Image (cartoon, helix red, strand yellow):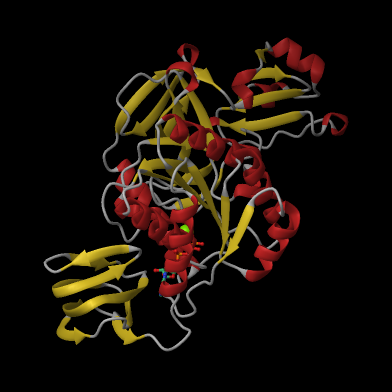
Amino acid sequence: MSSVTEVELGEGRIIRITGPAKVDVVTGRILAVGSKFPAGSSLVIHKFRSYGIKVLTQSKVRITLGEGAKVEEARNGEEVVDEWLRVVEYILRKCAERLCKILVVGPPESGKSTFTAFLANYLREAGVRVGVIDGDVGQEDILIPTTVALTEVTKPILWLRELEPQLFKFVGCISPQYCYPESILAIKELVDEAVKLGFRAIVVNTDGWVGTTSGIEHKLAITRWIKPDIVVVTDREVFDYLSKCIDGLVEVVYTSRPTVARERSREERRELRTQAYRKYFSRGRIRRVKLGSIGILNIRALAGRAIPADEIRKLLEISDSDLSKVAYSSKYGDTVFLVTKEPVDISLNQNEAGKVAVLNLRDLRGAIVGLLGERLSDVGIGVILDADLESQEVTILTPWDGAIRGLVVGKVRLSEDFEEIGRVSKCIL
Ligand SMILES: Nc1ncnc2c1ncn2[C@@H]1O[C@H](COP(=O)(O)OP(=O)(O)OP(=O)(O)O)[C@@H](O)[C@H]1O
Ligand SMILES: [Mg+2]
């Protein structure tokens, strides 16, 4: 069921629309997410999102509301549009003549991604070439969760999901605390590449991990390595911490978060991640790669030196029947890896505990994997469908159809329907 209403709106008014909704501008001009929408244009608001829309000149708009959608007049102090406009105008002035890097930091649901889009739209319409990096591995909108991605903003957008990635880096997890260095390095590499691509402004969105000391330190580490000109913070407490630490080194700007917004539950956030995986992998086809012919960066069991059965007997106390279940064994550093054909429970000499890992390559099924091309470049993402030691083959679903030179296995596993089903076992990675 949808309802359509046509309303006349006076200049300066701010309305808030929660999706699913479509807005057609019949006459006049409105501002949504930093972008001006003239008569004849329209915008679509997703069911999980809400926006404050400002009327720039007396306008007539036709609003189509889907199920659960609503439109309301923003009350005094509720909407951030005017404050955000002041911040982006300030950034535009600051960045008028030279390359400018802006980092956006804040808690979950505080408007980081929307502010990133708002700033990018505003700068683009002011004639600035803008590159956007979505550095939020958990809610990555430009590509898929587990990655960070860069692209140019060439059209008005309400949501970073409306963009197609130009470059990306596979990070491999959806919580930066589990891939701390990679998440920083990936953003840093993309910023460097954005500089090479000649963008005048580079806007970097970050994850919402700021509720703990480590989370804030992670943002400080990103700041240190990407060297932004301005850090925009959507939370007063986080602003205070960052200003205290980097005062005099980087300009830190506070801006309010929307006080009334469509919040997403854990399930809805999960659903959004699933939708992103589905969209990407629906274009996938099955690829088979030979184990010996490619580089594999982080499957520990395959990284070591293969060892024969009699050497295992010397290293471990193991019965012949248990040994017969082992398909492959290797030694890697101080650890012996036993890859079994079936999930088995091999009991090991207590003294050796911690030095032996027993695993089944089936545990790799569903693992999300970064595909590397020439010179370790990130070329695609895949899902491992199977890994077989007898045929020495890894079967991968991926939309990437060029050469695969290497694999980096991520920590997330997906079901056949591309829903997250837990982590890849620690023994494997
Ligand atoms: N001006 C606004 N008025 C009302 N709602 C808004 C406004 N700006 C953004 N929102 C809504 O607030 C919610 C949070 O915004 P956004 O997704 O940008 O935050 P975030 O900090 O990036 O969240 P996440 O932690 O999930 O990445 C979204 O539903 C968004 O549509
Ligand atoms: Mg976000």
The residue positioned 80% from the left and 18% from the top of the image is 315
Q: Measured along the vertical axis of the image, is residue 45 above or below residue 180?
A: below
The answer to which of 237 and 227 lies nearer the viewer is 227
**Ligand 1 image-quadrant field:** bottom left
Residue drawn at x 69%, y 13% is 309
Q: Is residue 209 visible?
A: yes
Q: Is residue 57 above or below residue 223?
A: below
Instruction: Tell me residue 63's x, y (percent).
Output: 19, 78
Q: Quadrant of the N terminus?
A: bottom left
> Outermost residue, right direction?
351
Above or below for 153 versus 349: below
Q: Nearer the viewer, residue 357 or 344?
A: 357
Residue at the (17%, 74%) spot, across then down:
28
List x then y, in percent, for residue 388. Answer: 47, 24
Q: Quadrant of residue 150?
A: top left
Q: Is residue 68 left or right of residue 342?
A: left
Q: Where, quadrant-wise, is the C terminus in this rendering?
A: top right
Name the residue located 42 percent from the left edge and 48 percent from the top edge. 415
Q: Position of residue 7 (x, y in %)?
A: 17, 86
Q: Nearer the viewer, residue 98 or 109?
A: 98
x%, y% of residue 421?
Answer: 49, 51
Can you see residue 328? no
The front one of 357 and 323 is 357
Counting the numbered discs, the total is 0
